[in-house]
Image (cartoon, rainbow, N blue to C red):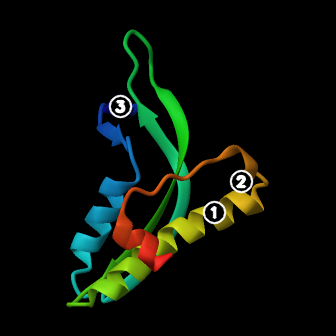
């Protein structure tokens, strides 16, 4: 965790991943039925004997409420992989990436 202090002595914790702030957002909006989010943002990790290390992370989330079928769940999971591949293609990086899927149900969704 990276903590910084402003000129008034207030401490702020910088995000170390993109999941926790999004989880807080969803918790405050309990009535949110469905949401798809893709974000690219900075995250910060503490380093021993140094200020911090900054990195750029990407996250794609699908939020669904209510019961849904196994087939629907597989389609949602497969969509995550497809979106990742689309982003890599747009960035002209798909030739440098290998995605390994070890989930047989997810393979059926693809």
- What percent of the width, then of the height, locates residue 56? 56, 43
CA separation in Å, label 1 and label 2: 7 Å
The disc placed on residue 3 is: none
Please, what secondary structure does the residue beneath circle 3 have?
strand
- From the image, tell me which residue sits under label 2: 94
**Considering only order in the chain, which callout, 2 or 3, is on the residue closer to the N terminus?**
3
Using the image as rendered, state which of residue 11 and residue 76 is in the foreground: 76
Do the CB atoms of the residues marked 3 and 2 lie less than 8 Å apart?
Answer: no
Graded by Cα atoms within 10 Å as few (under 14), some (14 to 19) or many (20 or more), the crowding at tag 1 reads some
Graded by Cα atoms within 10 Å as few (under 14), some (14 to 19) or many (20 or more), the crowding at tag 3 reads some
Is residue 83 depicted above or below 44 in this figure?
A: below
Quarter of the image where one finds residue 73? bottom left
Using the image as rendered, state which of residue 96 and residue 44 is in the foreground: 96
- What percent of the width, then of the height, locates residue 72? 36, 87
Q: Residue at x 71, y 53 (%)?
A: 94
Q: Residue at x 47, y 73 (%)?
A: 78
- From the image, tell me which residue sits under label 1: 85
Please, what secondary structure does the residue beneath circle 2 have?
helix
Do the CB atoms of the residues marked 1 and 2 lie less than 8 Å apart?
Answer: yes
**Left or right of residue 16: residue 65:** left
CA separation in Å, label 1 and label 3: 31 Å
Instruction: Single out the residue that lies furthest toward the top.
Output: 49
Q: Residue at x 79, y 54 (%)?
A: 92
- From the image, tell me which residue sits under label 3: 2
**Left or right of residue 97: residue 28:** left
CA separation in Å, label 3 and label 2: 32 Å
Please, what secondary structure does the residue beneath circle 1 have?
helix
- What percent of the width, then of the height, locates residue 51? 44, 19
Is residue 79 depicted above or below 69 in this figure?
A: above
**Considering only order in the chain, which callout, 2 or 1, is on the residue closer to the N terminus?**
1
Q: Residue at x 33, y 31 (%)?
A: 3
Quarter of the image where one finds residue 91? bottom right
């Amino acid at each position: 965790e990276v903590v910084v202090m402003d000129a008034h002595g207030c401490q702020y914790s910088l995000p170390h991943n993109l999941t926790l702030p999004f989880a807080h957002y969803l918790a405050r909006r309990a009535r949110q039925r469905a949401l798809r989010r893709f974000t690219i943002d900075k995250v910060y990790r503490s380093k021993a004997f140094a200020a911090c290390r900054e990195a750029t992370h990407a996250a794609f989330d699908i939020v669904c409420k209510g019961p849904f079928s196994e087939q629907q769940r597989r389609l949602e999971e497969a969509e995550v992989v497809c979106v990742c591949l689309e982003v890599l293609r747009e960035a002209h990086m798909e030739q440098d990436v290998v995605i390994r899927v070890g989930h047989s149900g997810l393979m059926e969704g693809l």
